[in-house]
Image (spheres, helix red, strand yellow):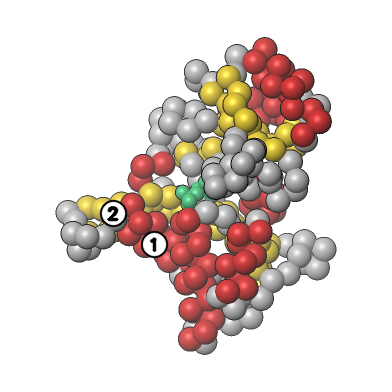
Amino acid sequence: MTAEQDPVKVMKQEVGKAAAARVQSGSIVGLGTGSTTAYTIEYLGSRLKSGELKDIKGIPTSFQASVLAKQYGIPLTTLDEVDHIDIAIDGADEVDPQKNLIKGGGAAHTREKIVDTLAEQFIVVVDSSKLVDKLGSTFLLPVEVIPMAMTPVMRAIEKLGGKPELRMGVKKAGPVITDQGNMVIDVKFDFIDNPAELEKTLNNIPGVLENGLFVGVTDLVLVGEVKDGQPTVREF
Ligand code: 5RP
C-alpha cells in the first residue's frame, strides 16, 4: 500500500474482491449495496469478462447494485424467476461477535434482508472499523417507515427508549426516499441488549416496513485489515 492510498478504501477493495473470488460459475448471486460491495460487483464483472467465471446471474439489493451490475456486465434476474440464491455478498455498518449486523447505511436494508436471508450462503464484507462488541455502539439503527405513519412510528419508538431522527438527503432537499418510496429514521438506543427481540418489536409497529437488524443470518464475515502497512483479509 502506498502512502497516498486511503487505508479504508484499500481494505474495502481487498475484502470486496476476496468475496467475489468465492463465487462459482453457474451461481445465482445476491448483489449487496454500498461502497464495499461495489468492488465485489466490479470484480465479478472482470472475472466474467476474462472467462474465468461463467453463467452467473445477479439479484440486486438496490437500484445502486443494479446500475453497477449493468455497468460491469453481470446479467440480472429476479426472485420471480429463480427458486434459490446460492450466495449473497453484502456490506454492513456494524458486526457483533455473534455475526449479527446493523445494516441500512445506504437505506437499502429492506431489499438486502430479503435477498441476504434467502441465500444459501451469506457473506458479509467489512473493513475492521465495523467490528463492535455490542450493536448500536457506533451506528444508529435504520428503520424504513411508510410516510403516512411517520409520526406514530416515531412516538412508538420513543416509548421503547429510542431517539429517532428522520434521515435527510445529501445534495437533495428533504428526506431520503428509499427504493420503495418510503422514508428512513435512524434510531439511537443507549444499548441493544437483545437484537433478536428488538428486531421483532420494531417490525411489529404498524407502519414500519423493515429495520436494519440482521440477526442469525450471517454465515461468514470477511474482514479487511491493514497489518504492517499491508492490506489483508481474514475470516470471522
Ligand atoms: C446499505 C448497507 C451497506 O451494506 C452498509 O451501509 C455498508 O456500506 P459500505 O460498504 O459503503 O460501508 O447496509 O443499506
As helix, strand or loop, the secondary structure at mark 2 comes to helix
Which badge, 2 or 1, comes first in the chain's sequence? Answer: 2
Q: Is residue 116 above or below residue 100?
A: below
Name the side, left or right, on which 124 lies relative to 233: right
Q: Is residue 9 visible?
A: yes
- Identity of the residue drawn at 44% across and 61% down: 16
The residue furthest front is 173
**Considering depth in this image, is 179 or 91 the residue closer to the camera?**
179
- Identity of the residue drawn at 73% across and 69% down: 77
Q: Amino acid at mark 2?
A: Pro
Residue 23 lies, in percent from the top left, at 53, 69
Q: Say which residue label 2 marks.
A: 7
Residue 138 lies, in percent from the top left, at 43, 31
Residue 43 lies, in percent from the top left, at 47, 72
Q: Is residue 27 visible?
A: no
Q: Is residue 72 above or below residue 178?
A: below
Cα distance between the residues tagged 2 and 1: 10 Å
**Considering depth in this image, is 118 or 142 the residue closer to the camera?**
142
Q: Which mark is residue 69?
A: none
Q: Say which residue label 1 marks.
A: 13
